Amino acid sequence: MAVGFAACASSRVQIPPDLKPIKIIQLAQEASDRNRYNVALQYYQALQERNPGDEELVCTAEYEIAFIRYKQKKYALARGELEALLQRYNAPDAEFLPPKFKLLAQKVIEQINAKENKHRRRSSRSSS
C-alpha cells in the first residue's frame, strides 16, 4: 500500500526532523536514480531549508534541484537555477563555497546551450 502512495507524483514525503543531512542526500539520490524526481526534489528542498547556514549543503541542494530540472528537460528553469547558483560564486565570500558546484553548473549550462542550439538548427532546417 505504501508503495502506491509513494509513487503518486503529488505525494508529500514525510522526512523525520532529526534525519541527518547525509541521509537526506542519500535518499534524494536514490529517488532521483529511480526517476522519482518529485520525491528527490522534496528531499533536496528539505536539505536546503533545514541547513540555511551551511553553504556546502545549500549549494548541494541548489545544484541537485537544478540538475533534476535538467533531467526533466525543463531547460529554462534549470538554467535559471544554475545561474542563480553561479551568482553565489561572485559574492565576496565565494572562496568558502565548494568549487565543484561552480564547475558542474557551468557544464550543465553548456549542455543546455548545446541542446537548445541543436533544436534551433533542426527547427530552422525544417522551416526552410
Image (cartoon, helix red, strand yellow):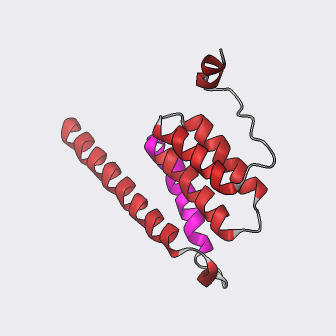
Outermost residue to the top: 1
Say which residue appears at 64% left-offset and 80% top-offset. Answer: 91
Give the percent coordinates (x, y) of residue 47: 70, 53
- Describe residue 109's horizontal placement relative to residue 6 as left or right: left
* Residue 16 position in % (x across, y down): 78, 42
Please, what is the dominant secondary structure of the magenta stretch?
A: helix
Please tell me whether residue 86 belongs to the stretch shown in magenta.
yes
- The quadrant holding residue 49 is bottom right
Residue 76 visible at all = no
| Quadrant position of the N terminus in the picture | top right
Report the residue at 32% width, 49% height from top.
115
Q: Percent from the top left, x then y, of residue 53?
A: 77, 68
- The segment highlighted magenta reads 71-88
Q: Is residue 19 a member of the stretch shown in magenta?
A: no
The residue at 60%/35% (across/down) is: 38
- The front one of 28 and 93 is 28
Q: Residue furthest right?
A: 17
Q: Is residue 35 left or right of residue 119?
A: right
Residue 51, by quadrant, is: bottom right
Where residue 22 sits: x, y (%)?
64, 56
- Which of 68 and 19 lies nearest the eye of the viewer? 19
Q: Please state which of residues 4 and 79 is positioned toward the viewer in this rendering.
A: 4
Q: Is residue 52 left or right of residue 101?
A: right
The one of 20 and 95 positioned closer to us in this rendering:
20
Query: Residue 40 is drawn in which quadrant?
Result: top right
